[in-house]
């Protein structure tokens, strides 16, 4: 039984890991090797990585970081306070508590046209501000929903105690409640960053020119002359590796946050 | 320390009236225990005093000052919660110092007071630990230490002993009494445990359905219960209560008290004794079957049955048990003076 389960997990891990391995290998292959499925061995080349460095992928990565960090900073501050209100005071009723993710059901295409018009009229097209605003539409609800579970897990008596002991509502929140949910905020921030970091759709439509984010840059290797697969794979690795590392460190809290259970005290 | 005055205090949650217009004087320097079954409004009353709930109407005065609309922090109270509410991210030292820091006590003064409180509760060797590394009893002590270090106008205890095991609970009860005597504190203590109420209180406030049934010393509420509810709630095992028909027919006793206004009669289990233990004709005597004997040590609880639908409890000395066997019919006796009478509304008839 145990052996069967383990081999099943091993098999599944292979299935999950296969694309990553393929991408890593492809990033060191020449176009000829990539276009010859029959070849097993190949001579590694660093050409793809050179293209990535010379081609502005790192600039796009910096843009993505700026967009991600600002999005996360706003979402964490607003989402945390919102989640606290929803968890403690039932702000917005049960509908808000459970409906906050409803916006996720909407196809992005519904939102992107009004957002584009808005950005156009405000002269914000092709700026990071437009991208950040669009990212907040899906990052903020997720962060809020994520944090509600963490606030629910903090006993109400902590604040009651702090308020009797001499602090106001906000003082009690800052000194007693916030430290309890810091791990949750960390996980939410990383989760939110990944959502922003991986977005192609909004970034492509609202800021496809000078302020290319990393996913937009990666997509741009799908050219009129064909797909520059090797370079694309190297750029994909630039995009994926930091996220993988971040997720590795917060995986447990991430799972707890996503399952809405919060941490136990 | 200060006295607390509640006047016509009401708390409504939507249609539910949790506290229904209570008037209560909580004297300075005494332990006042609010006791009652779950949902009787005792914890709500405590939270109203603390300012953690806003009252629907009525007035709360602490030390003569109207604090009804004041924030909790402005009321100068300290509270100990059932789950202790020790901040898990702070050491014991920081937990105890928390309230002092909120009141801008710093430096040597802070250190001196934290240490004094910790020593008073014998937790001075635990100051650098986090709450998770403490036992239940130690957490309890730290929680009380955090309250006394502030030297507030009054202490509010919300069932602080109910998470402890039986032995620790008795120990902590004594500890609270010792601290109270030492500090002369005003304490409002909430519990559902009538034994805890009896042992801790200078004044017991028995609550039921959002109202006060009786306020009195432990002896008063036990010996002169104002209502049938108080009579049954205070005392363990619970008082035996019969309607007058059952008193007359089943026990074959005391017909005279069943006349007049009294419609129910109550007899404390310790007033039901073996016939051989009570001499003379001042007692009403009856035969009953001993169904169960529960030995407590010095005493034993007997469950007696006269007829199928009428059981009663007797608390007898273990020494009298030699003659008692389960399943046997024996003679029991009740002193006439030991009978409490209640009218149709459940009030005691004197």
Image (cartoon, grey):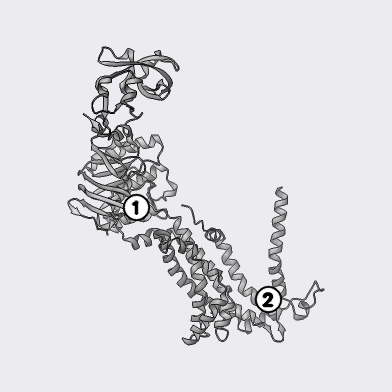
Q: Determine the residue positioned at 35% across, 37% down.
A: B193
State which chain disc 1 sits on.
Answer: B
Outermost residue toward the left in this view: B64
Same-subunit check for callouts 2 and 1: no
Residue A216's place in the image compared with A147, above or below, is below
Residue A229 picture location, percent across and down:
71, 79
Q: Determine the residue positioned at 29% across, 43% down.
A: B189
Residue B203 picture location, percent across and down:
24, 38
Q: Of helix, strand and loop, which one carries label 1?
A: loop
Residue A65 picture location, percent across and down:
53, 76
Of badges 2 and 1, nearer the viewer stands 1
Residue B162 picture location, percent across and down:
38, 41
- Residue A133 visible (yes or no): yes
Residue A166's place in the image compared with A79, above or below, is above
From the image, tell me which residue sits under label 2.
A233
Inter-mark Cα distance, 2 to 1: 64 Å
Label at residue B15:
1
Dot 1: few (<14), some (14–19), or many (≥20) neighbours within 10 Å?
few
- Residue B151 visible (yes or no): no
State which chain disc 2 sits on.
Answer: A
Q: Determine the residue positioned at 18% across, 54% down.
A: B65
Q: Horizontal placement of A145 versus A214: left or right?
A: left
Dot 2: few (<14), some (14–19), or many (≥20) neighbours within 10 Å?
many
Q: In which quarter of the image is residue B104?
A: bottom left
Frontmost residue, B74 versus B190: B190
Frontmost residue, B63 versus B251: B251
Q: Horizontal placement of A99 versus B124: left or right?
A: right
Label at residue B76:
none
Residue B238's place in the image compared with B324, above or below, is below
Residue A27's place in the image compared with A245, above or below, is below
Looking at the rendering, in which quadrant would you find the C terminus of chain B? top left
């Amino acid at each position: 039984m145990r052996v069967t389960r383990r081999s099943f997990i091993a098999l599944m891990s292979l299935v999950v890991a296969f694309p990553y391995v393929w991408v890593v290998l492809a990033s060191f292959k020449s176009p000829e090797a990539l276009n010859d499925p029959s070849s097993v061995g190949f001579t590694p080349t660093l050409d793809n990585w050179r293209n990535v460095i010379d081609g502005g992928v790192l600039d796009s990565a910096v843009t993505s970081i700026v967009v991600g960090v600002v999005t996360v900073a706003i979402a964490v501050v607003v989402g945390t306070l919102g989640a606290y209100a929803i968890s403690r005071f039932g702000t917005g009723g049960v509908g808000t508590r459970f409906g906050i993710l409803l916006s996720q059901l909407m196809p992005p295409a519904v939102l992107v046209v009004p957002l584009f018009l808005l950005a156009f009229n405000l002269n914000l097209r092709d700026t990071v501000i437009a991208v950040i605003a669009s990212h907040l539409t899906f990052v903020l609800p997720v962060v809020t929903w994520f944090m509600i579970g963490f606030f629910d897990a903090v006993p109400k008596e902590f604040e009651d105690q702090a308020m009797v002991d001499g602090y106001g509502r906000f003082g009690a929140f800052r000194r007693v409640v916030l430290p309890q949910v810091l791990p949750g905020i960390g996980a939410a921030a990383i989760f939110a960053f990944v959502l922003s970091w991986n977005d192609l759709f909004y970034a492509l439509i609202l800021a496809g020119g000078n302020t290319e984010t990393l996913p937009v840059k990666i997509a741009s290797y799908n050219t009129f002359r064909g797909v520059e697969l090797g370079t694309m794979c190297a750029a994909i690795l630039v995009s994926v590796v930091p996220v993988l590392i971040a997720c590795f460190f917060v995986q447990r809290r991430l799972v707890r946050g996503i399952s809405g259970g919060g941490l136990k005290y | 320390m200060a006295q607390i005055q509640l006047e016509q205090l009401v708390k409504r949650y939507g249609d539910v009236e949790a506290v229904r217009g209570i008037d209560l004087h909580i004297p300075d320097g005494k332990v006042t225990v609010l006791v009652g079954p779950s949902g009787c409004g005792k914890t709500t009353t405590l939270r109203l005093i603390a300012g953690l709930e806003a009252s629907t109407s009525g007035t709360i005065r602490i030390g003569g000052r109207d604090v009804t609309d004041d924030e909790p922090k402005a009321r100068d109270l300290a509270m100990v919660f059932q789950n202790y509410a020790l901040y898990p991210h702070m050491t014991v030292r920081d937990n105890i110092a928390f309230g002092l820091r909120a009141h801008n006590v710093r430096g040597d003064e802070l250190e001196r007071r934290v240490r004094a409180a910790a020593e008073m509760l014998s937790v001075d060797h635990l100051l650098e630990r986090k709450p998770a590394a403490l036992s239940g009893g130690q957490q309890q002590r730290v929680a009380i230490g955090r309250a006394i270090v502030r030297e507030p106008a009054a202490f509010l205890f919300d069932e602080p002993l109910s998470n402890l095991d039986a032995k620790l609970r008795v120990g902590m009860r004594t500890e609270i009494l010792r601290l109270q005597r030492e500090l002369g504190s005003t304490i409002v203590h909430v519990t559902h445990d009538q034994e805890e109420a009896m042992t801790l209180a200078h004044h017991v406030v028995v609550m039921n359905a959002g109202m006060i049934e009786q306020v009195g010393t432990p002896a008063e509420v036990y010996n002169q219960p104002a209502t049938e509810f108080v009579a049954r709630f205070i005392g363990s095992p619970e008082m035996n209560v019969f309607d007058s028909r059952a008193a007359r027919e089943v026990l074959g006793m005391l017909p005279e008290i069943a006349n007049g206004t009294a419609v129910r009669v109550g007899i404390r289990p310790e007033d039901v004794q073996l016939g051989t233990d009570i001499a003379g004709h001042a007692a009403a005597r009856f035969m009953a079957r001993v169904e169960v004997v529960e030995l407590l040590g010095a005493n034993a609880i007997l469950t007696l049955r006269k007829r199928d639908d009428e059981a009663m409890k007797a608390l007898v000395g273990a020494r009298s048990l030699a003659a008692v066997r389960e399943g046997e019919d024996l003679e029991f006796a009740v002193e006439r003076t030991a009978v409490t009478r209640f009218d149709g509304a459940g009030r005691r008839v004197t």
